[in-house]
Image: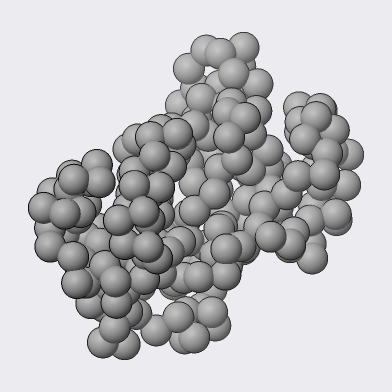
């Protein structure tokens, strides 16, 4: 996966203004966010990853990929719900994935049009899809569209990392965390990615 064209500028600016991020950027030198280039799998991975760890999500996704051979709308729609649950999905997540596959197959999910929408408008549209909340929509903006300035404050990993690095591990309110994150604009996706990496050696990817 190729890094976004803004990555070098973003890391340079963040390192210059934030000592914590400077340390993380140096620690993970040579690594960067990259898009998988497939809208359906990015959304599907995000649904699989809801409310579970990165490792657990990867394990479920690997089993799903083995069973389906390729996780596409066409392959997923053909599998019955019990077969999907046997891969480690909850019944609700299996329903969400099958509904998402239908939306891609019937054209309701119009990726070409999505590209032209600003972040908040697209988040509003994505959250109209079954099983897609704000967090999942934000993962799509970060990992598929590689939008540079997304701050997914509902993400537990990001909350943990902010408290760890900016308040010695002690709890912070969401408004305080939002204030810390505001200083990273217009590169909040980049800052988020490095903070995720600081917690888990497994790259965060959807």
Point out the image quarter for the N terminus: bottom right
Residue 49 or 121: which is nearer the viewer?
Answer: 49
* Residue 136 seen in the current view: no
Residue 142 lies, in percent from the top left, at: 56, 57
| Left/right of residue 180 with respect to residue 81 in the rendered view | right
| Left/right of residue 5 with respect to residue 196 in the rendered view | right
What colour scheme governs how the chains and residues are painted in the rendered image of this protein?
one colour
| Residue at (31% x, 62% y) in the render | 68
| Residue at (56% x, 13% y) in the render | 169
* Residue 29 seen in the current view: yes
Locate residue 145: give its quadrant.
bottom right
Residue 73 lies, in percent from the top left, at: 31, 74
Residue 24 lies, with reference to residue 130, above or below; the image says above
Residue 51 or 186: which is nearer the viewer?
Answer: 51
Locate residue 80: give its quadrant.
bottom left
| Residue at (48% x, 17% y) in the render | 171
| Left/right of residue 193 with respect to residue 129 in the rendered view | right
Locate residue 75: give its quadrant.
bottom left
Residue 12 lies, in percent from the top left, at: 88, 47
């Amino acid at each position: 996966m190729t890094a976004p064209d803004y990555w070098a500028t973003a890391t340079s600016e963040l390192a210059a203004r934030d000592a914590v991020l400077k340390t993380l950027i140096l620690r993970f030198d040579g690594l960067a966010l990259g898009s998988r280039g497939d809208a359906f799998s990015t959304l599907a991975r995000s649904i699989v990853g809801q409310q579970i760890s990165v490792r657990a999500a990867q394990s479920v996704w690997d089993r799903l990929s083995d069973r389906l051979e390729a996780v596409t709308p066409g392959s997923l729609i053909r599998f019955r719900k019990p077969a999907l649950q046997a891969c480690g999905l909850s019944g609700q997540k299996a329903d969400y994935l099958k509904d998402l596959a239908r939306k891609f197959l019937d054209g309701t999910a119009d990726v070409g049009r999505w590209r032209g929408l600003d972040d908040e408008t697209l988040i509003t549209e994505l959250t109209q899809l079954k099983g897609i909340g704000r967090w999942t929509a934000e993962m799509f903006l970060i990992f598929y569209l590689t939008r540079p300035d997304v701050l997914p404050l509902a993400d537990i990993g990001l909350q943990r990392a902010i408290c760890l690095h900016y308040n010695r591990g002690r709890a912070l309110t969401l408004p305080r965390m939002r204030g810390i994150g505001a200083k990273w604009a217009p590169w909040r996706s980049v800052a988020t990615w490095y903070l995720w990496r600081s917690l888990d050696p497994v790259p965060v990817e959807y």
